[in-house]
Image: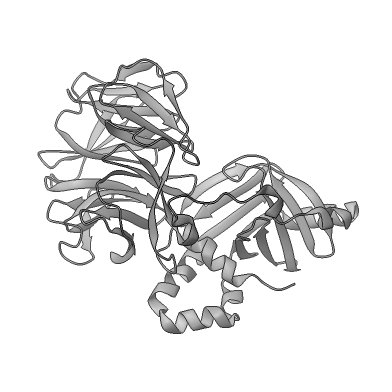
Amino acid sequence: MKRRTGSLLVALAMMGTAALAGNFAKNKVGSAGGWTGTIAGTVLDGKIYTIEAGGSLYATDPADGAWTKVGAADFANTAFLFAAGDSLATIEKDGSLYLINPADGSWKRSGPAGGWANTVAGAVLNGKLYTVESGGSLYASDPAAGTWQKVGNPDFSAVAHLFAAGNRLVSIEKSGNFYLINPADGSWERTGDFAAWADTVAGTVLGQVLYTVEKDGSLVATDVASGTREPVGAGFDDVQFLFLANNLLCGIDADGNFFHAAAGAESAEAAVPVAATSAPSTAEDEAKNDPARAGALTFQFMGQWVGDTAPLEQDPEFLKQKAAAPEMVQKVIDLMQGMKMSVTLDGVTMEVMGEKAGPFGYSVVAGYDDTLVIENNDGPKQGIRSRIVFSDPKHLQVIEVTPEGKAMFFKKP
């Protein structure tokens, strides 16, 4: 069977690396102006939660922009909104911290009134809420208990934006400088070019890649560890919020429009939906199904897998791209090497550069020769089938049965 290396490159690009990602553009989704007046937003369990100036809380499906109002309009004084465990957390203008039930909008105060006064930026990392106050102090809070602890020295008075990436905090200063912060002791180091992020308006993180929107409307992808910036799109003028939800890069602009940051053909203003009949079929797989072979392949699928870059180095097209843009292609290789997949009877868990998702349940559709076909039962790819093709017991390729045919290689560690 021919290996789909080209599709692998597309899949990796959509997973967050700037390399080979093409040119992203805004693709409006949902009702025009439907998010007018948004003052805060965050992502929890694959949904985008936003608060409007009137105090209403909304949950948006990132795929189609469908939204639902949650609870009463109690949040007009919100300054910051975060996802903290199974709850939403707000810091109000008076500095009080509240926990919100995302199911019904009910809320309760956590910690003392005004305990987070003078907060200028915040991010959640490993269950803790890290906030910076105007005086420059960094605090680590337990949102549920409403307690906090000062971290390090008051070195952060110039912070404009704060993000969580991997196991570190990332700050962008008012000067535009880029810093990596150790959350354990507040120690920091600068990376990247001086003042390169001076025009950053909003940002979001996927793995070790920080996407930012600049004042000139450009979309930039930054490798967090090295501070290397790559322009990946244009036309993002007046964007106020940027989110990463269910592997969709999306946001809200000043006109209240919700959009996807789409690459390639997906960037058309009015994307043409693909008819269901055009998607690849697995009828032939099911016709070949051998229950005994399906069981043996399912057992072979179990266990731990890591990204396999060896097939890339054997593909002529990949080698051409590597020769033309070695630094960009190296990011693809680094991302692939940072991928892990854990398979049990309960589901598949994916890890990309330290960020985990799952486990997501699956059902076995068919098995024959060296091919196992499964269907995702839940998660962001619910209903999508994949062919698991084994080249030997320790090497496999996962190919999504979709028109795009995204594919990835894995091997036993």
Please tell me which residue is depicted at 45% across the width and 84% down the height of the picture: 323
Name the outermost residue toward the left.
135
Please tell me which residue is depicted at 67% across the width and 72% down the height of the picture: 3
Nearer-the-camera pick, 225 or 271 = 271
Left-right relation of 339 to 204? right
What quarter of the picture does the N terminus occupy? bottom right
Tell me where residue 89 sits by quadrant.
top left
Tell me where residue 195 sits by quadrant.
bottom left
Left-right relation of 43 to 185? right
> Is residue 223 visible in this depiction of the protein?
no
**In the rendered view, would you say 90 is above or below 234?**
above
Nearer-the-camera pick, 69 or 8 = 69
What quarter of the picture does the C terminus occupy? bottom right
The percent position of residue 335, horizontal first and vertical second, equals 47, 64
Please tell me which residue is depicted at 64% across the width and 56% down the height of the picture: 304
Left-right relation of 53 to 375? left
Q: How many marks?
A: 0
**In the rendered view, would you say 10 is above or below 33?**
below
**In the rendered view, would you say 63 is above or below 355?**
above
The percent position of residue 356, horizontal first and vertical second, equals 51, 48
The percent position of residue 9, horizontal first and vertical second, equals 53, 68
The percent position of residue 64, horizontal first and vertical second, equals 49, 39
- The structure's colour scheme is one colour
Tell me where residue 100 sits by quadrant.
top left
> Is residue 163 visible in this depiction of the protein?
yes
